[in-house]
């Protein structure tokens, strides 16, 4: 009888150990999917790779993130709905693709000048996206939570013709992805042109366009500075649209508090690591462009002032407010003013 009891105790212990290790295994197999439009290369690709590393590190390997790079799962314009509906757990969100659903998020390009450092840019974004109730509610309405931000380098024009001033834009066909930048180009008598991003290289080669106005690293990564080697770099002008990463709210709520805290700690660590890379990238890209024979002009304070003080900017800002109100946004004018105030505070941090 005693021998039988001992055997039962041993089996109970074995069963307890199996259950314990089964629980540990389950805790280590939280898998999240992430849809992005970028590839692994370039500044933003590095930012996502860092995010994956830091989340896995800060959850002790309990969370694994499977990244679907380069629109391999969802197109850029599909990611917001994909995250909202649970097609994918996490995703890169660019407000430019969702003018109806994230209208308030589209205000940033109408405030051209911003802090230079990523730390202060990130502070501005975090304040605007988390502390302005109307903007935060806009994302919450899409059943997702903002957890991470990265970014790209400041605005730059690459041109097929020599360029050392915004005044040189006169008569030139310039491509930009922002409707607001396209409108501002008219103040310099440029011809604004919309060309798909993937077609820009050939458009520059064939003379369909004379230049592209976008972020510096995007120009260099896609080799637009080969057919357009005249670089006019504007470090004080940010590529203003926030590069956001969100998680489906239902998926988030299903995670334990420990896992949630680990993910958020990983996101914060990723922001800090990304900031270090960001600060070095401007000089690295400029140096490489000079080595390959590009003519690089850094915009002076006077030139930056020309763009920031373009005559049509106040009118376009009022147009944005009116369109926001027509789209059903409440307190649009106050929201815009709050964004302006946060940007101003961010700039003051560097003075």
Image (tube, rainbow, N blue to C red):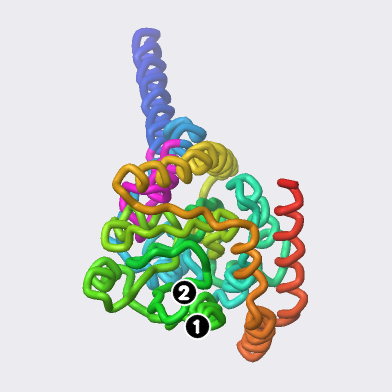
Circle 2 residue: 169
Mark 2 neighbour class, 10 Å CA radius: few under 14, some 14 to 19, many 20 or more: many
Where is 239 relative to 193, above or below? above
* Residue pictured at 37% horizontal, 18% vertical: 8
| Secondary structure type for disc 1 | loop
Q: Give the quadrant of residue 135.
A: bottom right
* Residue pictured at 42% horizontal, 40% vertical: 284
Where is 286 relative to 80, above or below? above
Residue stretch rendered in magenta on the structure = 29-53
Horizontal arrangement in the rendering, residue 243 relative to residue 129 (left or right) = left
Percent x, y for residue 209?
32, 76
Instruction: Give the mark, 2 or 1, whose residue is nearer the N terminus.
Output: 2
Q: Give the quadrant of residue 334.
A: bottom right
Whole-angstrom CA distance, mark 2 to mark 1, is 7 Å
Horizontal arrangement in the rendering, residue 331 relative to residue 310 (left or right) = right
How many numbered marks appear? 2
**Is residue 226 visible in this depiction of the protein?**
yes
Magenta segment includes 48: yes
Image disc number at residue 189: 1
Say if mark 2 contacts mark 1, CB within 8 Å. yes
């Amino acid at each position: 009888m005693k021998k039988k009891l001992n055997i039962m105790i041993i089996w109970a212990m074995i069963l307890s150990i199996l259950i314990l290790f089964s629980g540990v295994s389950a805790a280590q197999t939280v898998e999240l999917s992430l849809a992005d439009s970028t590839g692994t290369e370039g500044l933003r690709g590095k930012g996502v790779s860092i995010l994956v590393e830091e989340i896995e590190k800060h959850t002790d390997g309990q969370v694994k993130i499977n990244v679907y790079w380069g629109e391999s799962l969802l197109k850029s314009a599909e990611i917001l709905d994909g995250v909202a509906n649970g097609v994918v757990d996490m995703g890169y969100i660019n407000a430019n693709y969702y003018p109806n659903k994230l209208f308030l998020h589209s205000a940033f390009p109408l405030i051209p000048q911003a802090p230079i450092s990523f730390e202060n840019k990130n502070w501005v974004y975090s304040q605007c996206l988390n502390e302005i109730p109307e903007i935060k509610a806009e994302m919450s309405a899409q059943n997702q939570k903002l957890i991470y931000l990265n970014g790209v380098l400041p605005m730059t024009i690459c041109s097929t013709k020599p360029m050392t001033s915004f005044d040189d834009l006169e008569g030139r066909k310039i491509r930009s992805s922002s409707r607001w930048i396209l409108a501002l180009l008219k103040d310099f008598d440029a011809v604004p042109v919309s060309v798909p991003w993937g077609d820009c290289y050939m458009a520059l080669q064939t003379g369909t366009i004379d230049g592209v106005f976008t972020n510096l690293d995007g120009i260099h990564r896609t080799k637009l500075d080969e057919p357009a080697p005249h670089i006019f770099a504007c470090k004080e002008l940010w590529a203003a649209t926030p590069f956001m990463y969100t998680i489906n709210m239902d998926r988030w709520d299903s995670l334990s508090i420990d896992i949630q805290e680990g993910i958020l700690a990983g996101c914060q660590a990723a922001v800090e690591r990304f900031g270090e890379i960001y600060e070095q990238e401007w000089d690295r890209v400029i140096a490489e462009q000079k080595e390959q024979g590009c003519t690089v002009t850094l915009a002076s304070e006077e030139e930056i002032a020309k763009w920031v003080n373009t005559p049509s900017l106040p009118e376009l800002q009022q147009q944005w407010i009116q369109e926001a109100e027509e789209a059903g946004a409440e307190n649009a004018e106050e929201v815009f003013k709050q964004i302006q105030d946060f940007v101003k505070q961010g700039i003051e941090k560097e003075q």
